[in-house]
Image: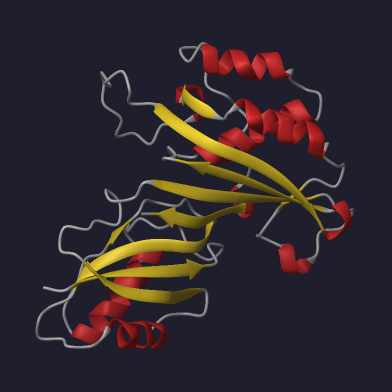
Amino acid sequence: MPRILFTCSYNGTPWRGWQSQAGGTTVQDVLESAFCAILRAPLRISASGRTDAGVHAVAQCFHADIPESCRMSPENWRAALNAHLPGSIRIMKAELVDADFHARFSARGKVYEYLICTAPVLSPFLEGRAWHRPMGVNADLLAKSLAVYEGEHDFRRFAARRGNEPDNPPADFYLRTIYSTAVTVEQGGELLRLRFHGNGFMYRMVRLLVGTAHQVANGKMSADELRSMLADPMGPKTRHCAPADGLYLTTVIY
């Protein structure tokens, strides 16, 4: 069966995340329903990873094995799927890949961005799409805080429990490498765009990284305390989780 890699964008606000669940109100459920409407048969898709409820994607990737009986080109698949999808989910690209390609296991890294709005009044066009912090955020301190995360670290104190973790995880289970971070100031200083490029991210990891760095930027935690959380991964997990609204999966790197 031909394997096609799809790149999709979605506004995560209406959806209960990516992963299929009872009720059919996730991005995966809606996409699989669109495939079923076209093929008149169920079809499972495999994504690069999950996103939580309310989290957005500029370029989430998933693959699907198309039955030989359906001879549509990847370009026609893009058009056909978009005709069956709501406006909050769009297929942006479709391309043939090798049979051994896997949207998750072939990925070498990901880029996430997080938006913080510091305007006194949140624009209705940013509702559900940015974390509103009208009291302001020190962008320089925030950038320095994010830089602490760069490199390979045991990030277990910055990972929420999903419930399927092994009882005795291997030594490298929580090891991740963050290659780079950045903070860009936009819209006259009222919008901060945080960027994380890493080889992989755990459950709610980016939101926990943002929330904890925000504590440092606002003077409620020192940079040394942040460093100690990485140096001593066996301590208590951080309690500071930024909301889902501002998080975007922007790139999956293959």
Quarter of the picture holding the N terminus: bottom left
Residue 39: quadrant of the picture: bottom left
Picture coordinates of residue 205, whole percent (x, y): 50, 36
Q: Is residue 127 left or right of residue 68?
A: right
- The relative height of residue 211 versus residue 17 in the rendered view (above or below) is above
Do we see residue 160 in this rendering?
A: no
Quarter of the picture holding the C terminus: bottom left
Residue 211: quadrant of the picture: top right
User: Which residue is pictured at 27% across the width and 78% down the height?
Assistant: 35
Picture coordinates of residue 147, whole percent (x, y): 65, 30
In the image, 1 versus 133, the foreground residue is: 1
Q: How is the image coloured?
A: secondary structure
- The relative height of residue 41 versus residue 62 in the rendered view (above or below) is below
Picture coordinates of residue 168, whole percent (x, y): 25, 18
User: Which residue is pictured at 16% across the width and 74% down the height?
Assistant: 2
Do we see residue 202 in this rendering?
A: yes
In the image, 13 versus 59, the foreground residue is: 59
Q: How many marks?
A: 0
- The relative height of residue 210 versus residue 76 in the rendered view (above or below) is above
- The relative height of residue 48 versus residue 236 in the rendered view (above or below) is below
Q: Is residue 192 left or right of residue 92?
A: right
User: Which residue is pictured at 15% across the width and 63% down the height?
Assistant: 99
